[in-house]
Amino acid sequence: MRRAPKSFFLALLFFLSPACSAQEKENLILWYEKPAAIWEEALPVGNGRLGAMIYGGTEEDHIQFNEETLWTGGPHDYSNKGAFGYLGRIRELIWQGKQKEAEDLALEKFMSVPLHQEKYQPFGDLWLTFPGQGNVTDYRRELDLSTAVCKTSYDAGGTSFTREYIASYPDNLIAINLACSKKNALTFDVSLTALHEGFTAVPDKNGMITLRLKIKDGLLGGTAIIKTTVKGGRIFINGNKLHIEKANEATIILSAATNFVSPSDVTGDPDAQCKKYVEAAVGQTYRQIRQKHIADYQKYFNRFKIDLGSSGNEGLPTDARILKVPEKMDNSLAAIYVQYGRYLLLSSSREGTYPANLQGIWNDKLNPAWDSKYTVNINTEMNYWPAEVLNIAECHNALFKMIGEVVPAGEKVARNHYNARGWVLHHNTDLWRGAAPINASNHGIWVSGSGWMAHHYWEHFLFGRDTDFLKNIAWPVMKKSAMFYTDFLVTDPATGWLVSCPSNSPENGGLVSGPTMDHEIIKSLFKACIESSEILNTDATFADSLKKLLPSIAPYKTGRFGQLQEWMTDIDDPDNKHRHVSHLWGVYPGSEINWKENPGLMEAAKTSLVARGDEGTGWSLAWKINFWARFKEGDHAWKMVQMLLRPQGKSSSQARGGGSSGGGSYPNLFDAHPPFQIDGNFGGAAGIAEMLLQSHLGEIELLPALPQAIPDGIIKGIRARGGFELHYSWKEGLLQSVKVISTAGSRLSLRYKDKTYVTETKKGDVLHLDGNLNAI
């Protein structure tokens, strides 16, 4: 058979690739036929620092907003300076089988001071009140993921009204534009309120309202300023509100800031910050602000595209589509879910800002679930699983910024609690960068938060191969993390192995010696440090010390029912349906347990996951998607995606998951733990990508866990370790064509089923292959 010319395959690839069409844009829109009645129906916008939830009401529109540094508390050293004196006795009690006594002693003598960390806070509420707009027609509320523009539109009294809402990163503000189809038809009131006691909101004749507040339990306060401008009509003060009368168009600029400067400095001037951003915006039109916002956002968002086929439900509102998921999976909704994950990360985690917390940057409660802080025994890390593979690696910088501030606190905890070098982070941190164990000793004493965070630096390097980043940013953090474990690991008297003690397998089984997850994280970190030392040609003596320690760390074991043991002793309960599956860390996001090097352990890990069951909280479902992808069981992974997309509150029988009903999705596609936690959104997006590409074993494998339910599809802009970006398509379950861009000049090793393609590359090389991995 004569080979088709290269131009044919290039044309085919172009034809199959999704174009910037009206249909594609419509497939990137969340839309609804009624205003939000509850917070979990409202639509999120954000610029990394400011976040807002848009309700889109007709008579009254509610915009609830946050600023990322408004927390309770103040600068504080959480470490317990006398803790180390009790470490030896705690270990002895654990080894003697006296777990309860060990936990009691640890709770009394070894924990953070105080025992709990601080809370992320809502900032304020912007209210727009429209007289006589109770009866409307043609209502639509939407969020366009392709532009990061939220919009409300409807007809009332023969006039069409539209509102647009954006959170601009370039201008560091939220902007709202109101327009109407008839002249002088815009009449409404604007007001600002807050949940915080004693807030003030003062309007002035210049179309501004200034909101000031003080946190009840802490040292932080904040200022928010809105500036309203109109075309036609007029603005005047009406009590504590601004009244806009008979305008043609109006624009509202919102900025907010606090006195937070750093975890040790609360001397900032929020008034000055707000005024700076508002004054800069006043010199621009809304369309100029909007244009800059879209251009900035799309330079990241447009890098990646995904098409998983249609479902027939594309013409339905998003909430109606979610309701139908238990009956029949919606492939194009799953594709939207991936892009929504990217949107949420770009909206809550931009360069120069802090990372996404348990709720991203969106919170409407003074006492949010789990304080809406940073839980680092899975949740914060899961937030960043999609950053590299889904081509928004810059979002990782926000996490690195926070870790850089945690390290000094972690060094104090390492010294005061363990008499160790380096730094350690337990299972939570907050704005003040607490690193000591909190809440309760039976799950708060878990020492691997720092090791897992260091793993993110290594992953960022593996995807980008930036040796300057590795040398100047990653290596100091990774090395200090490894140093802690070299001092902390202790010989288990019963076996002679080096073990992590005291610690916990999150958040299951209490205070123990040698949980499998700790050893997986520590071994992975040691190996990453050894490889980093070789790449950078530095710290060879330290790397040699890690090489000597590695064989002495307790090995992984298979238990009595064929499971990967969660602990050193064979006490796993096959009926335990706990949401955490911590001992499978080595399967994902780690890679030490895999089909290539230790298939027996992979089988044991799969047995553990089967025993845990499919049901779980939202983020637990998301983690299980990634596990089943690594097990290369695409149909099971896709089943977990269906469970994640199901409407929250639906029964387990409808979800086909077994066990009690658990997580799912709210009408605005927020992940339901329940309640809302954003980690499932990110973990689910990463899991779908993991089904379609894997690169953790030194080669790039295409469609490693493709389910039968996705026979046709297209991916553009997905990233792989080694410094590669790939575009490819498949039809009737078979790979059709592949485009590979080398961004680092690394050796390319590509696999699809039993076919391989290996070549050296130079940075900037573009390779085209057919479905059999033949170069074209």
Image (spheres, grey):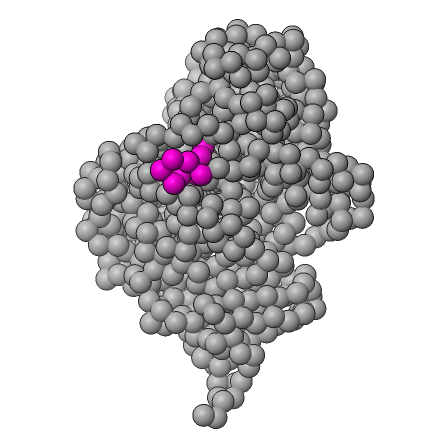
Q: 280 left or right of 648?
A: right
Q: 70 left or right of 134?
A: right
Res. 243 image quadrant: top left
Q: Measuring 45% from the left and 23% from the top, which residue is drawn there? A: 371
Residue 284 painted magenta: no
Q: Using the rendered image of the protein, determine whether residue 49 is visible from the camera's viewpoint.
A: no
Res. 398 image quadrant: top right
Number of numbered tags placed on the structure image: 0
Q: Measuring 80% from the left and 38% from the top, which residue is drawn there? A: 541
Front in this rendered view, residue 555 or 37: 555
Q: 391 left or right of 679?
A: right
Magenta stretch in the rendered image: 558-566
Front in this rendered view, residue 73 or 438: 438
Q: Using the rendered image of the protein, determine whether residue 504 is visible from the camera's viewpoint.
A: yes
Relative vertical location of residue 228 with respect to residue 446 in this rendering, above or below:
below
Q: Measuring 46% from the left and 18% from the top, which residue is drawn there? A: 442
Locate residue 685, reporting x and y percent: 43, 49
Locate residue 135, reporting x and y percent: 19, 42
